[in-house]
Image (tube, rainbow, N blue to C red):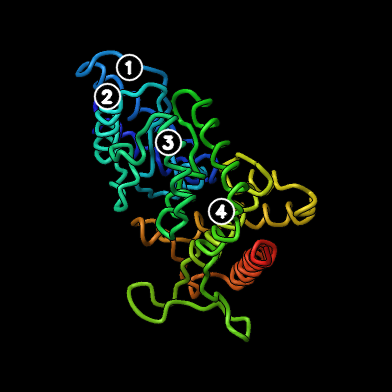
């Protein structure tokens, strides 16, 4: 595939063949994005010469966690061992433009390797993390939490591991888990007092529930904080839950929450409207068989329980 348009054609023609599971779908996204990055590297070398040092390209957000749906925007960055930031910003520009052509819209929050915040040497990134945590504002902690989901797709894994270990150490040193909790664990009620699922009452998604906001994000955010407490560098929610220390979460509870999360991803893939990025988070309750409504209620309850557990555990510090 010698052009980004060809890569996009490959994505469009084959994505439906990879929608039978979350694992298959995210492996396919990785394949497409890898092709984009490899082409971007080739083009940058042609323009700027050889790569000046070792580097890694990493995904964040749902891509970093390997939890992308059919649609996904861009969330990525670059780490490198040299101090030649201009070279890698050029590469970041090429990657960002290439991904847009290949069907991944630009990130509205500019969480992309073309942004200097997400394209730095390891030394500078470590200092940036320390600055974020010392400031401990809502915005700086949001940047920090975004970075924690980073996963290397191409390049030297050790660069990211080094920076992440620094990040985890600083969180514990600054005793910031309760502040990170405040930044993430805010959820809307998803059932009423009668146990009925609360759906959108107006707008284009009337009668639907945003399953990402109602259940997936509370579990994602909770698992991320438990992983930091357990010094678990994993990025996917499933591996984070699996890596939580048994003194924090029993193996039985780990299995229960992992099963819930995996089922939720499959449920969204099966029942959501995949016609657009926004629609892909919504499920219309009236279109579900009764047994699927009951399953969804069970998932929502389990997600809420994990949310409350982490809120109680970390909020009392």
Q: Which of 302/220 is in front? A: 220
Earlier in the chain: of badge 1 and badge 4, it is 1
Q: Which of 187/98 is in front? A: 187
Dot 3 crowding, Cα within 10 Å, few <14, some 14–19, many 20+: many
How far apart, in angstroms, are the residues tagged by discs 1 and 4? 40 Å
Q: In this view, does 302 lie above or below 129?
A: below
- The residue labelled by disc 4 is 266
Mark number for residue 125? Answer: 3
Q: Quadrant of residue 276?
A: bottom left
Residue drawn where x is 41% and y is 30% of the image: 79
Earlier in the chain: of badge 3 and badge 1, it is 1
How far apart, in angstroms, are the residues tagged by discs 3 and 1? 19 Å
- The residue labelled by disc 1 is 51
Q: Quadrant of residue 3?
A: top left
Q: Which of 216/186 is in front? A: 186
Mark number for residue 188? Answer: none
Mark number for residue 87? Answer: 2
């Amino acid at each position: 595939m010698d052009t980004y348009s060809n890569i996009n054609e490959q994505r469009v023609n084959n994505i439906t063949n990879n929608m039978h599971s979350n694992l298959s779908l995210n492996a396919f996204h990785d394949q497409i994005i890898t092709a984009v990055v490899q082409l971007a590297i080739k083009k940058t070398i042609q323009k700027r010469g050889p790569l000046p040092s070792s580097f890694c390209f990493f995904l964040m957000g749902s891509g970093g966690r390997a939890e992308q749906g059919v649609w996904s925007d861009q969330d990525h960055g670059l780490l490198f061992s040299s101090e030649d930031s201009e070279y890698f910003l050029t590469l970041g520009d090429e990657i960002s433009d290439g991904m847009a052509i290949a069907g991944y819209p630009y990130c509205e929050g500019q969480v992309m390797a073309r942004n200097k915040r997400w394209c730095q040497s390891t030394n500078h990134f470590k200092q940036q993390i320390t600055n974020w945590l010392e400031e401990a504002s809502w915005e700086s902690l949001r940047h920090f939490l975004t970075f924690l989901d980073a996963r290397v797709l191409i390049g030297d894994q050790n660069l990211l591991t080094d920076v992440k270990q620094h990040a985890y150490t600083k969180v514990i040193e600054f005793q910031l888990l309760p502040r990170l909790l405040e930044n993430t664990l805010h959820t809307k009620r998803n059932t009423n007092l009668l146990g009925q699922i609360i759906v959108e009452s107006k707008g284009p998604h009337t009668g639907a529930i945003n399953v990402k906001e109602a259940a997936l994000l509370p579990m994602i955010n909770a698992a991320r904080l438990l992983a930091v407490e357990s010094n678990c560098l994993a990025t996917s929610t499933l591996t984070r839950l699996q890596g939580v220390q048994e003194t924090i979460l029993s193996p039985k509870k780990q299995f229960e929450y992992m099963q819930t999360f995996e089922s939720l991803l499959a449920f969204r893939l099966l029942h959501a409207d995949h016609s657009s990025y926004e629609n892909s988070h919504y499920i219309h309750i009236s279109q579900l068989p009764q047994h699927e409504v009951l399953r969804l209620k069970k998932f929502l309850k389990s997600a809420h329980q994990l949310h409350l557990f982490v809120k109680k555990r970390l909020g009392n510090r």
